[in-house]
Amino acid sequence: MMFITDECQPTLEERYFLKIRPQLYKLHASHYQYGVRKGTSLAEHLDSVCQFLLTITRIAGVPEEKREIILAVGVTHDLNKLDESGRSDKKLARGRALLHEQLELAGVSDLAKSKEDYELVRRFIERHTGSSASGARRYFSEDGDIKKWTAMLIGADVFALGIGEEKRLRK
């Protein structure tokens, strides 16, 4: 297989389209959604979010190692849709078991290379729900870019809704 880059290492985009995206559809193509996302599968939603994030993080000049973490978040940000107990994303991310399982299943666990990366994934998922940082926040220094990157995730999530501009801008 030949890759676009000179170093024969796949770019994050290549990894997404060759490995991660097919896995999303394998896992979630039959998981249909409800509400404003009725008529689409969870795989379609996650794919839309991930493609948006890949584009916007490249344009914004986000460092590659952070783009990887943001992509892992895009793949797993809707944990509540994978849990039948009705728990929120925030609670599920804090519990870690489902998050770890979903990172593994989606083939993106290698994007969160350290405990700090994993904690950043968890915090992004928690933040995308509109929650403030958790109690664990006091143990981790706050990266000044987290707010910008969380806004990118929220933007991708809302944009993927396919709702009108007026309602989307309110969110």
Image: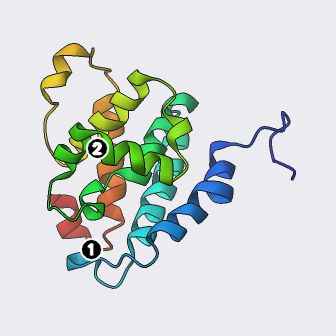
- Marks 2 and 1, how far apart at CA: 22 Å
User: In the image, is 96 to the left or to the right of 105?
Assistant: left
The residue where tag 2 is placed is: 125
Q: Nearer the viewer, residue 57 or 99?
A: 99
Q: Which of 141 and 94 is in front in this view?
A: 94
User: In the image, is 81 to the left or to the right of 42?
Assistant: left
Q: In which quarter of the image is the C terminus?
A: bottom left
- Residue 74 visible at all: no
Instruction: Give how far across and how far down residue 111 sits, in percent.
Output: 53, 36
Q: Residues within 10 Å of mark 1 (few under 14, many from 20)?
A: few
Residue at image coords 53%, 33%: 61
Residue 22: quarter of image: bottom right
Residue at image coords 38%, 51%: 76
Query: In the image, is residue 92 above or below residue 165?
Result: above
Residue at image coords 37%, 75%: 31
Instruction: Give how far across and how far down residue 163 sits, in percent.
Output: 27, 74
The residue where tag 1 is placed is: 163
Q: Nearer the viewer, mark 2 or mark 1?
A: 2
Amino acid, disc 1: Ile
Q: Which of 138 and 159 is in front in this view?
A: 138
Mark identifier at residue 89: none
The first of marks 2 and 1 along the sequence is 2
Query: In the image, is residue 123 above or below residue 39?
Result: above
Q: Is mark 2 on a helix, strand or loop?
A: helix
